Amino acid sequence: MNNNLREKMSYIKGLAEGLGLQKEDTKEAKILTNIIELLDDVVDALEVLENSQAEQDDYLDALDEDLSELQNEIYGEDEDDDETNYVEVTCPHCHETVYFDEQMFEEEDDIICPNCKQPIYEEGEEDSEEEGGE
């Protein structure tokens, strides 16, 4: 972006030199010369800001990568986060609808309601229901 501004600034300076504004001692020439110098300073300041912003972006990208690596080391890689399935269950005690991670049914012996703290499913309950259903 600043290359385009720098080119335009050079063009304006060239026009001013072609008109001989620096050599003229009129009020208008002084004003235009000062405006051109001010614009040149603004373009310089924008270049500095753009370079600084680019450095900050690079630094933030590196920091983000470092943080991601650190999170993976501490918490492990969680590639299955996008594939988490939830099961909707109505508690037989408080009749509230709660949601559990599907893996809890495979890993936990007893499933406890987070609202009333009563067991929703107890170990062996599913086995007795399956036997009674046959």
Image (cartoon, rainbow, N blue to C red):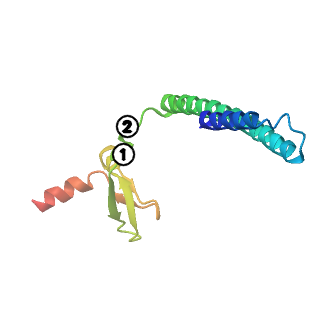
**Disc number placed over residue 82 in the picture, else none:** 1
Tell me where residue 23 appears, x and y as whole percent: 85, 34
Image quarter (top left, top right, bottom left or bottom right) of the C terminus: bottom left
- The three-letter amino acid code for the residue at tag 1 is Asp
Q: Is residue 35 left or right of residue 7?
A: right
Tell me where residue 62 appears, x and y as whole percent: 57, 28
Q: Secondary structure at mark 2?
A: helix
Q: Which residue is mark 2?
A: 79
**Disc number placed over residue 18 in the picture, else none:** none
Residue at x 75% of width, y 33% of height? 17
Tell me where residue 77 appears, x and y as whole percent: 42, 33
Tell me where residue 60 appears, x and y as whole percent: 60, 34
Q: Is residue 6 left or right of residue 107?
A: right
> Foreground residue, 21 or 39?
21
Label 1 – label 2 distance at C-alpha = 7 Å
Q: Residue furthest bottom?
A: 95
Q: Is residue 83 left or right of residue 34?
A: left
Q: Is residue 96 left or right of residue 26?
A: left
> Foreground residue, 40 or 132?
40
Query: Is 28 above or below relative to 15?
Result: below
Residue at x 20% of width, y 56% of height? 128
Count every numbered label the image shows and give the total.
Answer: 2
Around disc 1, counting alpha carbons within 10 Å, would you say few (fewer than 14), some (14 to 19), or many (20 or more)? few
Contact (Cβ within 8 Å) of mark 1 with mark 2? yes
Answer whether residue 108 is visible to the viewer in this image.
no
Residue at x 14% of width, y 61% of height? 132
> Foreground residue, 79 or 32?
32
Q: Secondary structure at mark 1?
A: helix
Residue at x 70% of width, y 37% of height? 15
